[in-house]
Image (cartoon, grey):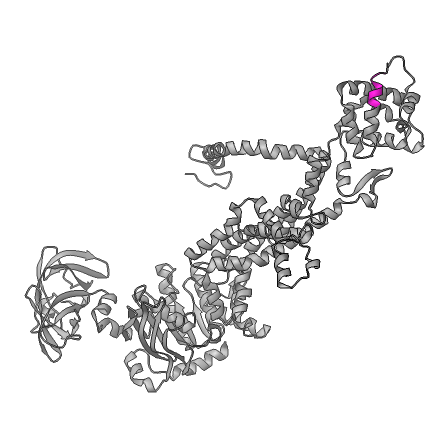
Amino acid sequence: MLGMFTSSDKRRANLPDFTNGETLLADGANSAAFVEFERVQKSYDGENLVVKDLNLSMPKGEFLTMLGPSGSGKTTCLMMLAGFETATHGDIRLGGTSINNIPPHKRGIGMVFQNYALFPHMTIAENLSFPLEVRKIGKSDREKKVMRALDMVEMGAFGGRRPSQLSGGQQQRIALARALVFEPELVLMDEPLGALDKQLREKMQFEITHLSHRLGITVVYVTHDQTEALTMSDRVAVFEDGRIQQLAPPDKLYEEPQNSFVAQFIGENNTLEGTVKEIKGETCLVQLDNGDLIDAKPINVSQAGERTRVSIRPERVEYNKDRMPEGAHTLKAEVMEFIYMGDIFRTRLKVAGKDDFFVKTRNAPDQVRLKPGQQIEIGWLAEDCRALDA
Amino acid sequence: MSDITDTGPVIAADGTPLKRSLARALRRQKIRALMLIAPLLLFVLLTFIMPIGDMLFRSVENNIVMDTLPKTVVALQDWDPDSGEPPSEAVYAALAADLKVAVEAKRHTRLGTRLNYELTGISSLFRKSGRQIKKWDLAQDAPFKAKFIDMNDGWAKIAVWRTIKTYSPKYTNGYFLNSIDMQKGTDGAEARPENQQIYITLFKRTMFMSMVITISCIILAYPVAWILANLPARTSNMLMILVLLPFWTSLLVRTSAWKVMLQQQGVINETLVWLGLVADDARLVMINNQFGTIVAMTHILLPFMILPMYSVMQTIQPTYLRAAKSLGATNWTAFWRVYFPQSIPGIGAGSILVFILSIGYYITPELVGGTKGVFISNRIAFHISSSLNWGLAAALGAILLAVVLVLYWAYDKIVGIDNVKLG
């Protein structure tokens, strides 16, 4: 284990800075693709494609999350990578070699399952020892590695227990240790925190992220929880309808969604529908269905007259006149509800005939607290308001 | 609520100890539960526990000698069988008095039958003597010793008197000794002559064949249960009907079907002869022997193995196998190290069920077992319905029951009964 740590730390050091995913993409040539999906398709019944034309390339050491609603094909992708499902079409490569015809047990990929899948008839130590035994590693080595792995997840004292004697969080740690004990370079995690309560889930999110970065392992993580995806990953692939809708680092994904689905799926989002009036370089003018005009950034629209759905994050909406950007188009709004949430205020507005428009403001001493019935004007920077596909 | 003090038990709000008030609160529930099961409990008590208890009691009960010959039994106390001499006149007089009463009540033949189990010939001795004694006058016909011996020289035999004396106590272990091929001899228990030994062989055979049947059931049932547990629910439900089909067919029909299959002019032999694999004059003997019994019983008991296995395997999630493979195990290792150990409770439950059912099986061995393939239960049935030696039947049954309980206990020690899942 010790050897693994040092060598992987070196490997880690060679990697580009993950805080900015863009460099990662740009420096693609620098770090050769480790996991690659090329034109992968998957069908179970021969009639419907569960995965449609999947292309994905990830470098060594990356923490990539596949995020999407259930039935979007993300778990199928993971299972194809693990070898439990075969791709109907296309090529999956690991370290440059195609693994389409390699059985799961020869792929050397660690995996953490949703319900942990700890073997109930074995003790914790035996569970961890299992992957080493099948690799015919000597007994003393085995014991050392098992101890190290247990210490790594701070469960050193639990080797003699049975899985059923552990709590959900503890089982989760053991499952993680078992997936790492044989020092795989790639670890897959299939909604590993789904069964934990909120507090424990947040704690485990940090632990998994830290551990994976410390060990320098490549992780493919599947979840339907967007908070989990945003907090843990280097990059997030948003799945819907068997396709990757957007593959980007969390900040880009949240701030610059490429289409309506991603905008809706990630975080809270206000949507207004309208028609593009004119496009002027980086901004465009959108006429809402009630006739009001707003500024937006054209993303998925190319010409005037097109239908569009503009998306704006609740925390980017401004109603304080002093802070309103100059020359911005404003909309009339009526306060429907003021919700005090402690750290933030959530205000529900009626805007352009729709009463599900939310504004989020920080709880600061100078913050205005709106009252229901109040008539206000709202505005935003054109670049925060994205004109997406209808 | 109550306060917990260091000095005494926890007290409920009204001052009574918490334990007592909890018991009172639960009593109503318990009474109600008891009333719900009362009809069944009564039914089981009357039709199952009591008859079995009564039957088991017969294995040691021996009132008949004491009741029929009370005076003789008392008089015999002074007689020493090892003296080599028949008993004194007093004993014969007592016998005459006892028999006079017994003959009138027509009980002497029953006693004869009972003692005949221990010494062949006593039955006819009692029957013949009974007719004569009717005419005797107790007051005038003394002395009786010469009269008895004159009537039937059986009454001069030491063996006859020894048998009466040996079996005079109210309770006897004679039936049990008999069931393990022993008898009461001059110096306590001794082995029976070799040509009369049968029960030990039968017990051993029953055990051995039940074991073979259980093992064949395991081997045949495991893959079937595995397939059923791993197929989609719709398909497996349909296949399950095929497993359950035997349950809906009469046991006799199934056993007779095996007769048709296995006999020398049967389907299998005819086919083999037709194919030329077996010569016409060397047809295989597959029935009326152990082979026939094993084949037919394996088939009949197979569902009892499949069902518990299936229900256990259904609970084993497929992710365990996937996890094992992702950890580097081959298909075989994943099965053997991960799946199989988790399916053992099903094997255990099925094995107990099949083994216990088969050591008590009766109809199938009777029909296809011939002489070499019968079980101990066939012998019990014989004593119940033909020889009418119910005491011996009860003793054999008691031993069978004890064996089952011992096996169950051993299984609990080795595998743990908590590991058994029947559904």
x then y, percent, for residue A226? 30, 66
Vertical arrangement, residue B163 with respect to residue A206, above or below: above
Locate the C terminus of chain A and report the quarter of the image it occupies: bottom left
Residue found 81% across the figure and 35% down from its top: B118
Where is residue A374, by image quadrant?
bottom left
Q: Assess whether residue B371 is covered by the magenta stretch.
A: no
Residue found 55% across the figure and 65% down from its top: B337
Q: What number of labels is visible?
A: 0
Task: Please tell me whether the stretch drawn in magenta is mainly helix, strand or loop.
Answer: helix
Residue found 36% across the figure and 84% down from its top: A31
x then y, percent, for residue A87? 38, 73
Where is residue A95, by image quadrant?
bottom left
Vertical arrangement, residue A35 with respect to residue A179, above or below: below
* Residue A211 in sight here: no
x then y, percent, for residue B126? 82, 26
In the figure, is residue A67 to the left or right of A348? Answer: right
Q: Assess whether residue B132 is covered by the magenta stretch.
A: yes
x then y, percent, for residue B301? 58, 50
In-front residue for pair B248/B227: B248
In-front residue for pair B350/B118: B118
Single out the residue that lies furthest toward the left.
A291
Single out the residue that lies furthest toward the bottom.
A30
Where is residue A41, by image quadrant?
bottom left
* Residue B311 in sight here: yes
Residue found 63% across the figure and 46% down from its top: B364
Span shown in magenta: B129-135
Vertical arrangement, residue B1 with respect to residue A120, above or below: above
In-front residue for pair B58/A20: B58
Single out the residue that lies furthest toward the top.
B139
In the figure, is residue A219 to the left or right of A287? Answer: right
